Image (tube, rainbow, N blue to C red):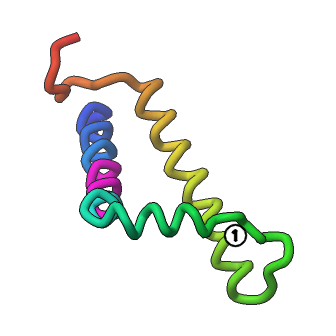
Amino acid sequence: MDIDLLILIARILLMTLFVMTGWQKLTGVAGTVGYMRSLGHRFWTMQGDKRHENFLNFFKNVSIAGGLILLAVAGPGRYALIGG
């Protein structure tokens, strides 16, 4: 498969992820502010399913960051909206 096509697909998937998860945060600012105020992560005192859920979310976030770094290193590819 063409590497430029794979880069385009990766960008579309990441954009979809951010739009789907970010839309509620953009339209419900009060809820987002309330959630952020309640943060103060207690991972090390969690047990059972709650700890496992937070463990998986951490590695999901690391994977997303890795994908963004890879796309930044790979460059825009042939299907970019702007010329390079």
Q: Residue at x 43, y 27 (%)?
A: 72
Residue extending furthest toward the right: 45
Residue at mark 1:
55
Give the camera-side residue of 55 and 23: 23
| Amino acid type, mark 1 | Phe
* Label 1 packing within 10 angstroms: few (<14), some (14-19), many (20+): few
Q: Is residue 78 magenta?
A: no
- Residues drawn in magenta: 13-20
**Which SS type dominates the magenta stretch?**
helix
Q: Residue at x 30, y 66 (%)?
A: 28
Residue 69 position in % (x across, y down): 51, 34
Q: Is residue 4 left or right of residue 64?
A: left
Residue extending furthest toward the bottom: 48
Q: Quadrant of the N terminus?
A: top left
Residue 5 position in % (x across, y down): 24, 38
Give the camera-side residue of 12 and 31: 31
Q: Residue at x 27, y 56 (%)?
A: 19
Give the camera-side residue of 57 and 66: 57
Element under disc 1 = helix
Residue 32's place in the image compared with 5, above or below, is below
Q: Residue at x 70, y 88 (%)?
A: 49
Q: Quadrant of the C terminus?
A: top left
Residue 82 position in % (x across, y down): 16, 19
